[in-house]
Image (cartoon, rainbow, N blue to C red):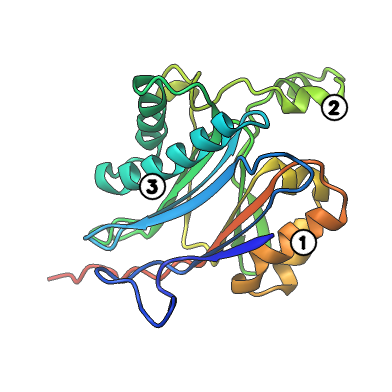
Amino acid sequence: MGVTVGPGTVRAGRRTAGPTPLPWWSAAARGPRRHQADAAGGFTGRDHRHAVAVADGVGDSSAAAHAARIAVDHAVRTAVLDGRADLAVLAARDVLLGAGLPGDAALTVALGPDARLAEPTWTVAWVGDVRAVALIDGAVLPLTREHTVGAEMRAAGIAVADHLDHVLTTSVRTVRGAVEIGLTSIAEPDALVLATDGVHRALGPDAPAALCARVPAPGLARALVDAAGAAGTRDNATALVVAPVRVPRPRRG
């Protein structure tokens, strides 16, 4: 198990150069799988806009791990440069297909506010089952809805076997256009949490909220991953926590 500390913290006595980075923290555990096919990352642009993302490779293979890493790295940069979280998902798809890569992944990307706008709103886009929640005044607000066969059938009132929760209806490779991408926004969250299904399925609906209520942001990712391991997760487990920096409002007049 490892913990990755996001940009803006001291690493080996050096601080990341350039625009003020966004504080984010991620933790990951391979678990019983042969490959670590989850990936997490973040990016800060020249205009101080930020993006973070988590991907969960489909399957237990090196191709799945590579697809997840490519998806995250490309999505966070595209989101910041193009200013659209949903287009970042499509850009990640185009990279996988254009390069002829065999892997696939679920992906959630969160794009921070544009400092030029009056309302500091985060935009979250996703395909698959990487979950995102917002922490606001001690409450936990779910932001994403899983793109799985199980979730869709339950929403229609149909009882289904649990294994259908692992069958994606959309993914980075298979998404056909922006209409299939989940998209939502949240204004001024205290923190955002992105987690793969190795975390949120193992913990159930109540445990993440309890952890978020008592563990500060710098230790929350590790706490979530450790809790998933203690609960017996059989998958890779990855969590990313971002503590947004308040964006100064534009001056009037």
Task: Give the residue pinned by disc 1.
Answer: 226
Residue visible at 61% across and 40% down in the picture: 37
Q: Is residue 64 above or below residue 41?
A: above
- What amino acid is at disc 3? Val
In the rendered view, does 7 fall on the left or right side of 193? Answer: left
Gap between marks 3 and 2 measured at Cα: 32 Å
Residue visible at 40% across and 32% down in the picture: 92
Task: Decide if residue 169 is in sight here.
Answer: yes
Element type at mark 3:
helix
N-terminal label among 3 and 2 = 3
Q: Is residue 99 above or below residue 218?
A: above
Gap between marks 1 and 2 measured at Cα: 23 Å
Q: Nearer the viewer, residue 209 or 74?
A: 74
**Foreground tag (3 vs 1):** 1
Task: Give the residue pinned by disc 3.
Answer: 76
At label 3, counting other C-alpha atoms closer than 10 Å, the crowd grade (few under 14, some 14-19, many 20 or more) is many
In the rendered view, does 133 fall on the left or right side of 68? Answer: right
> Measured from the top left, where is residue 205 in percent x and y?
80, 49
Q: Count the numbered circles shown.
A: 3
Q: Is residue 226 above or below residue 123?
A: below
- What amino acid is at disc 2? Asp
Q: Quadrant of the N terminus?
A: bottom right
Place residue 211 in its image quadrant.
bottom right
Q: Is residue 70 above or below residue 113?
A: above
N-terminal label among 3 and 1 = 3
Q: Residue furthest bottom?
A: 13
> Measured from the top left, where is residue 103 in percent x and y?
53, 26
Element type at mark 2:
helix
Task: Give the residue pinned by disc 2.
Answer: 162
- Which of the labelled discs sits on residue 125, or is there none? none
Q: Quadrant of the C terminus?
A: bottom left
